[in-house]
Image (spheres, rainbow, N blue to C red):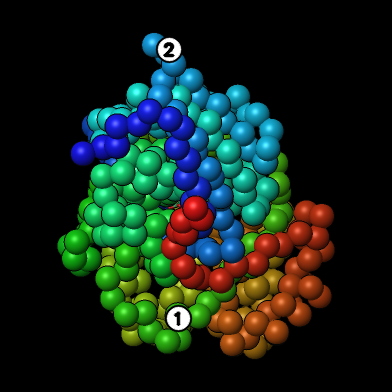
Amino acid sequence: MSNIQTETQSVTYRCPSNIALVKYWGKKEGGVQLPANPSISWTLNDLFAETTVFASPKMEENQKVEFFLDGKPKPSFEPKIHTFLQRISSIVPVVSQWDLRIESKNTFPHGAGIASSAAGFGALALCMVDLEGDLQPGSTEFYQKVSICARLGSGSACRSMFEGAGIWGELDSIPGSSDEYAISFPFEIHSRLKNWKDAVLIVDDGEKKVSSTQGHDLLKSHAYAHARFEQASKNLTELSEVLQNGNVERFVELVESEALQLHAMMMSSIPYYLLIRPNTLAIIELIWAKRGATNWEMAFTLDAGANVHLLYNSEQEDDVMNFIDAELLPYCKNQLYLCSAIGGGPLKLN
Ligand code: DP6
């Protein structure tokens, strides 16, 4: 039974961002936010959103929703939040009885090409399911419901609920996998791939010209869509094995190939578009050259943006940091990069 609420209640959650190793790119026809192919991500525990939701009984027929980012009203975000609330209303029916004040902040700049929507909708979904009060926070059932709700806000958000790695999308080789929600990676990750970190090299911090949602849409009529969806499934099956057997060389190959395929799909959509910038390519070339010269365990990946995620084994942290400072920083906007480790899932703060 949901709480019968007479006064304002509030809850605060911190939800991490994530970086996909096998990319979600394209949605299934006929469903709401169902992925055309399965994907896997590492959870980035230092890049997170912190969201407080104040829920009070609705005062008028129309639900009142206010959204604040870093203490400032952001009415431009409200239509997306209304869509989210409408989509989750059959799963968390009580939401439609509340007026909501949502206060959110991120540890990273909005629109920096970091999955801010993943952390943001993840945190919002955590707050909503917690406030509903039907499931024990922290239980498997709780995270499953949160993951379903987060997916309805932004697909990649559903993978942010898990320590280490999250998998979303049905795949025979992954027991328990589903299109509706993400699950924790169900196998032990090999010690050679367990303690990796991510340095996000900010090449462009502006708003993207084509949003991810628009990008997904272009897959509906994309000449290579079917082949890409098949390839992603194969890559995920193999990456799952690689994460378990610790074959770093193949890990690097699969992850970098996934990043380039994602951008190749953008370049071959109609209309076609480019999100990578000259400095993205300069950084990639420097990473390849350094790896060739040193055999350091590192790989790049890309989100739907120009920034480069440099994934590396934390055993090489000092070397990699020196490399970034000496060689990559000139290609970063305002000499900015953000560091995160692969790590824990969400945290309830009150
Ligand atoms: C390139 O989850 O942002 O980051 O579901 O439309 O909100 P919507 O899209 P979104 O797409 C993310 C795409 C990606 C790859 C990934 O995270 O798997």
Residue drawn at 26 percent across, 37 percent down: 2
The residue beneath circle 2 is 60
Q: Is residue 168 left or right of residue 284?
A: left
Q: For the N terminus, which image quadrant? A: top left
Q: Secondary structure at mark 2?
A: loop
> Which residue is situated farthest in the top direction here?
61
Q: Is residue 309 left or right of residue 134?
A: right
**Badge 1 local density, few (<14 within 10 Å), some, or many (20+)?**
many
Q: Position of residue 300 (x, y in %)?
A: 57, 67
**Badge 2 local density, few (<14 within 10 Å), some, or many (20+)?**
few
What is the distance, in whole Å, between disc 1 and disc 2 at their CAs?
Answer: 53 Å
Task: Indicate which label's residue lies in the foreground, 1 or 2.
Answer: 2
Residue 263, labelled with which disc?
A: none
Q: Mark 1 or mark 2: name the one nearer the start of the chain.
A: 2
As drawn, 215 above or below 297: above
Query: Is residue 245 or residue 277 the one in the foreground?
Result: 245
As drawn, 348 above or below 312: above
Three-letter amino acid code at disc 1?
Leu
The residue beneath circle 1 is 193
Query: Is residue 115 or residue 143 the one in the foreground?
Result: 143
Disc 2 within 8 angstroms of ligand 1 (CB): no
As drawn, 83 above or below 330: above
Residue drawn at 45 percent across, 37 percent down: 9
Where residue 223 sits, quadrant-wise, is top left
Q: Position of residue 164 (x, y in %)?
A: 42, 70
> Which residue is situated farthest in the front direction here?
6
Where residue 331 sits, quadrant-wise, is bottom right
User: Could you tell me if residue 202 is visible in this image?
Assistant: yes
Q: Secondary structure at mark 1?
A: helix
